Image: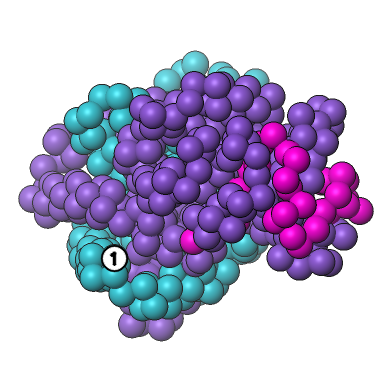
Chain colours: A purple, B cyan
Amino acid sequence: MKIGIVGLGLIGGSLGLDLRRQGHQVYGVARRADTCAAAVMGGMVDGATTDLASLAAVEIVLICTPIAAIAPTVQALAPHLAADTIITDVGSVKGAVVQAVSPLWPRFVGGHPMAGKAEAGLAAAEADLFRQRPYGITPLETTDPDAIATVHALAESLGAQVFICTPEAHDRAVAWISHLPVMVSSSLIQACLQESDTPVRELAQHLASSGFRDTSRVGGGNPELGLMMARYNRAEILRSLRFYQKQLATLTDLIEQEQWETLTTLLRASHEARPGFVETDPKA
Amino acid sequence: MKIGIVGLGLIGGSLGLDLRRQGHQVYGVARRADTCAAAVMGGMVDGATTDLASLAAVEIVLICTPIAAIAPTVQALAPHLAADTIITDVGSVKGAVVQAVSPLWPRFVGGHPMAGKAEAGLAAAEADLFRQRPYGITPLETTDPDAIATVHALAESLGAQVFICTPEAHDRAVAWISHLPVMVSSSLIQACLQESDTPVRELAQHLASSGFRDTSRVGGGNPELGLMMARYNRAEILRSLRFYQKQLATLTDLIEQEQWETLTTLLRASHEARPGFVETDPKA
């Protein structure tokens, strides 16, 4: 296939590496000419320009820009494409994106490959980034089945585990397991900074070990990503935060009232439920 | 030195491995004879019995039992020891332990090697478990300086990073970076279980990835450990939970009121503060 990728960062570049290796012809578009040159040099694309019109002949376009740029990009791209071209995206929020983009392009299929790493940008791109990682696809009832099938096959060709669901179910699910953890974890760091006894705060910093490291990781991550989650998945994040606050209040009450048996039951339930979400690891 | 270890589990066994390798003579006491046999077989001790009286000739005793057993063990051990024997412990809470044990044995020095792993028990013991890990030592003003120096040297001989502080400062600091994360993380798992839309909950379980894995790890850990933290460090955990709830409410309000600039400032502050607690890792 001839494939276009708009936005040559970590995700766009990594997709290019995998798709070229499969024998597809991959053409990139980036805002900056030096990014285009680097993507060609790095083998992420067969060619790249700063001009969306260069994608006129591709069969599918992957929009790999930040969330806020997805709809404007599709709007600017649409006049250049053949009517049967498929467009998909990689945004981590789907309701707002699908709602904005679907009216602009009938053959749009929302997508969300759930892979990432600390470093951003093209230089961090790597092959097999999506292997054995979840990949959500969020068609509407009106979405063309052939377009869905093409995006599905493309995601599976990356070695990803594909889940097809509505944009609403996707956003509610990722609020729980991706966006809520960021807010919970960021608040942990913030709370520790409230310790006004400086020697105690410094001691806490020295004593912090693997438990704090893991629990604070996503909360100490890229602030722009956290902001995007909050902006574009606001209602679902607020909903999950309210459930969370209630659970935390319950647990706090149990400690306050020294209800040790009930607390044990609750901690045991967490212990038993976790393997339903993630494979347990040696450190667990 | 002749060293006694009471409680041959993960910590006691690992200490034995390190101390024997340094050339010390290490004698163990466990409740069960088969644990004693396994510790001798595994090279954790030079000898082991189920009888505290067997430690009459040692110069220092390391109490490596669960927290609740520390004071009763010291009480039972005291009649068998020479007056200049030093006793230390490895409990993760220090205020309650030091308060209970100090009256029982003048040459007691509280200690807390902050290392652990998923598996409990002697079979999980390993050499170098404490290397480059924090090791808190919590003497009182009245504690004999020679006893402190001996425990300090022993901790450093393990390769640990020693921090000397009051039991109160220790408990407040570990509430922030060890105990609060457990409660925050357990509540995250509990909150996700509140999703009553079964397909969404199952989708969330499928989509959960490294972010959820890390944020839920300590909350999905050993329920008995969480209970011990809550019981023995109750006041400090409650204090840190109240600060945490306030921070979480602040963050929730910012999202509710769409105050994106202030939210960005807050998320950026978390991002910038985290390296003050833990070395940042490639995944961060």
Can residue B65 be seen? no
Q: Is residue A11 left or right of residue A271?
A: right
Place residue A184 in its image quadrant: bottom left
Q: Nearer the viewer, residue B112 or A162?
A: A162
- Residue positioned most to the top: B34
Q: Nearer the viewer, residue A27 or B246?
A: A27
Task: Judge whether residue A51 is colored magenta.
Answer: yes
- Residue positioned most to the right: A41
Q: Position of residue B15 (x, y in %)?
A: 59, 43
Mark 1: few/some/many CA within 10 Å (<14, 14-19, 20+) = many
Marked residue chain, label 1 = B
Residue at the image position 15 percent from the left and 35 percent from the top: A261
Q: Is residue A184 left or right of residue A260?
A: right
Can residue B235 be seen? yes
- Which SS class for mark 1? helix
Task: Kindly identify which residue carries mark 1.
Answer: B255
Residue at the image position 74 percent from the left and 60 percent from the top: A51
Name the amino acid type tagged 1.
Answer: Ile
- Residue positioned most to the left: A257
Q: Nearer the viewer, residue B254 or B126?
A: B254
Report the magenta residues as a range.
A39-68
Q: Position of residue A50 (x, y in %)?
A: 76, 62
Task: Judge whether residue A188 is colored magenta.
Answer: no
Place residue B63 in its image quadrant: top left
Q: Nearer the viewer, residue B265 or A209?
A: B265
Q: Position of residue B52 (x, y in %)?
A: 41, 35
Q: What is the count of numbered marks? A: 1
> Where is A223 relative to A172, above or below?
below
Q: Position of residue A267 (x, y in %)?
A: 27, 36
Q: Is residue A249 left or right of residue B44?
A: left
Residue at the image position 35 percent from the left and 82 percent from the top: A197
